Every structure is written in C-alpha cells, then in structure tokens.
Image (cartoon, grey):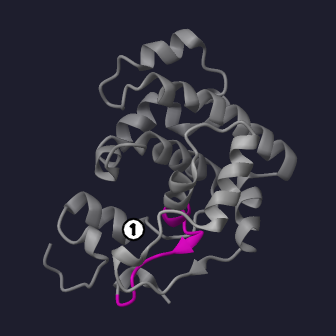
C-alpha cells in the first residue's frame, strides 16, 4: 500500500496486516465480547504466525458463535469435536477445547469483578502503558506485567495463556501502546 503513512514495519506490506495495524492493534478495547475474542485468537496463534489467524478470524467468529462466552461455556465435547472438522479454524484439539474452559473462566471473572474489562484494565490502572520503542526489535516478548497477568489467568483456569501470549494480547487490546515512535497510529 502506498499511502505515505509511516507504520510499524511489521505492517508495511500485507493488506491484512495494514488493516489490522491501522484499525485495531493497540487501540484500547473495553468490550467484554471483543476481549474474549482476542483472548481466544491470541491463544489460537500459539506456534503460528499472526497472519494465519487474521485470515481465519471471520471463520473463528462463525464457528464459535461470535465469541459469545455464555454460549462457548456450554459447548459439549461432541460440539467441540465437530468444530475440529471445520477448515475455517486451526483444528488443534487442545486449542479448540480451550475455548470452553476459557469461557468458563471468563464467566467466573465477570461474576467476581462485574466485567472482564474491569478485571483486566486494573492491571494498568485503567490507562494504557505507552512505550517508546523505535523498532520492533526493541519490543519484549514478555514483561513482568505479562508474567503477572498470565499467572493470574492460569490460576483462574485459563489455557493457552502463557506470558508471551499475554503480552501479544496486551498489545492487541491496547493495554500497552507499542506502535513505534513515528508510526501514524501511535496517537500520542
């Protein structure tokens, strides 16, 4: 894309990445459904490239009832096994079954805190952490905060939620703003 905008270099050429970078990545998310969606998609990405998941995001929404966690929490083993046959998603059994366990854990957090949003954003005092990286190579894969959140989520029953996945999640939903200095989408 040649629009003269300066972007983070990971989003420089592929239209799917450009759209995700420009319109979603790093923007603060406070909607519980979208927070659940991104949690599942980040977990699905484990061991794969993010673009693999982005290309299947619509399929994931269709297969997993638009990420309605109340529906996902009630999936039977038979329903989950049937989802493994759907080529629109990554058909890893553990990742598919984690949707149900994560929906159950997500529901418990909502019952305890009122919303997942309230639970999650308390880790950053309800305002994004603004980093000042000049290159992708400067960004960490994990931080002490992603370690803390990961440990707490695991303790609460979440799966596919290691510290690296949590840091990517924090970037995706805007808990941290890791748009590089000079990127038009940085917004600060």
Q: Which residue is depicted at the point 42% across and 36% down?
A: 60
- Point out the residue furthest to the right here: 112
Numbered disc total: 1
Q: Position of residue 66 (x, y in %)?
A: 51, 38
Query: 147 left or right of 140?
Result: right
Question: In the rendered view, would you say 92 is above or below 2?
Answer: above
The image quadrant where one finds the N terminus is bottom left
Q: Which residue is depicted at the point 40% across and 19% down?
A: 84
Foreground pick, 45 / 139 = 139
Q: Which residue is depicted at the point 69% across and 42% down?
A: 154
Residue at numbered disc 1:
23
Question: In the rendered view, would you say 147 is above or below 176?
Answer: above
Q: Is residue 173 magenta?
A: yes
Question: In the rendered view, would you say 141 is above or below 154?
Answer: below
Q: Is residue 81 magenta?
A: no
Quarter of the rendering containing residue 59:
top left
Query: 172 left or right of 107?
Result: left
Query: 129 left or right of 90?
Result: right
Badge 1 local density, few (<14 within 10 Å), some, or many (20+)? few
Q: Position of residue 21 (x, y in %)?
A: 35, 68
- Disc 1, SS: helix
Q: Position of residue 94 (x, y in %)?
A: 50, 26
Query: 88 left or right of 40?
Result: left
Q: Position of residue 105 (x, y in %)?
A: 72, 37
State the predominant SS element of the stretch in magenta. loop
Question: In the rendered view, would you say 138 is above or below 150?
Answer: below
- Point out the residue furthest to the top here: 78
Foreground pick, 66 / 18 = 18
User: Which residue range is magenta in the image?
Assistant: 170-182
């Amino acid at each position: 894309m040649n629009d003269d905008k300066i972007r983070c270099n990971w989003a420089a050429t592929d239209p799917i990445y450009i759209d995700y970078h420009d319109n979603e990545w790093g923007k603060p998310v406070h909607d519980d459904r979208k927070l659940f969606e991104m949690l599942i998609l980040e977990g699905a990405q484990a061991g794969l490239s993010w673009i693999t998941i982005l290309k299947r995001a619509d399929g994931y929404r269709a297969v997993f009832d638009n990420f309605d966690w109340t529906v996902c929490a009630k999936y039977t083993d038979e329903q989950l096994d049937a989802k493994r046959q759907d080529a629109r998603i990554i058909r890893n059994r553990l990742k598919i079954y984690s949707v149900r366990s994560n929906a159950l854990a997500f529901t418990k957090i909502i019952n305890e805190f009122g919303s997942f949003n309230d639970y999650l954003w308390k880790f950053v005092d309800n305002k994004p952490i603004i980093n000042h990286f000049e290159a992708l190579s400067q960004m960490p894969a994990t931080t002490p905060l992603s370690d803390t959140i990961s440990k707490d989520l695991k303790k609460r029953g979440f799966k596919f939620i290691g510290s690296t996945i949590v840091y990517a999640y924090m970037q995706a939903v805007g808990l941290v703003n890791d748009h590089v200095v000079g990127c038009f989408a940085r917004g600060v």
